[in-house]
Image (cartoon, helix red, strand yellow):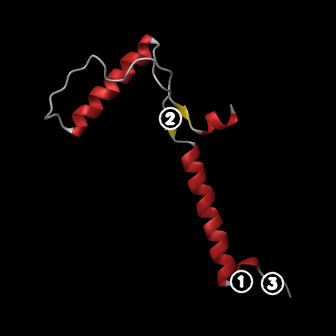
Amino acid sequence: MINPFFHTPGRRFIALAALVAVVAFGWYAVQPVYPRCTIGVGSGSLVSAGTSAEEMEAVARQAYEDALADGACGPSHARFRDWIG
């Protein structure tokens, strides 16, 4: 008689944990990373002390886009690209 691999609960748990680990690692590997800029992102933009987090993020995003257009920053890329060179 053939004994199925997932017959015992321990094997089932190990297989599920391995699958979750592979999926989590794959998700982490494809997350975008942004290279360091030669100028500070957000430089030249004045914001008041009472600015909300959403507005600060919008200002930082616009400064990054401006620096990207000027060639001061490189484009974002998947994290695993750093690992493979």
CA distance for labels 3 and 1: 7 Å
Q: Say whether disc 2 or disc 1 marks the residue closer to the N-terminus.
A: 1
Mark 2 or 1: the one toward you: 2
- Which quadrant is home to the C terminus? top right
Residue lying furthest right in this view?
1
Residue 61 quadrant: top left
Please name the amino acid that badge 2 sits on.
Answer: Val
Residue 71 located left or right of residue 50: right
Residues under numbered marks 3 and 1 in contact, where contact means CB atoms less than 8 Å apart: yes
Identify the secondary structure beneath mark 3: loop
CA distance for labels 2 and 1: 42 Å
Residues under numbered marks 2 and 1 in contact, where contact means CB atoms less than 8 Å apart: no
Instruction: Specify the label residue 52 is tagged with.
Output: none
- Give coordinates of residue 14: x percent, y percent: 66, 73
Mark 3 or 2: the one toward you: 2
Identify the secondary structure beneath mark 2: strand
Identify the secondary structure beneath mark 1: helix
Please name the amino acid that badge 3 sits on.
Answer: Asn
> Image point 28% across, 30% down: which residue?
58
CA distance for labels 3 and 2: 46 Å
Check the image and report above or below for 38 versus 25.
above
Residue lying furthest bottom in this view?
1
> Image point 47% across, 19% down: which residue?
73
Residue 33 located left or right of residue 41: right
Check the image and report above or below for 79 versus 66.
below
Instruction: Specify the label residue 3 is tagged with.
Output: 3
Which residue is the site of mark 2?
A: 33
Q: Nearer the viewer, residue 34 or 49?
A: 49
Which residue is the site of mark 1?
A: 7
Residue 30 located left or right of residue 62: right
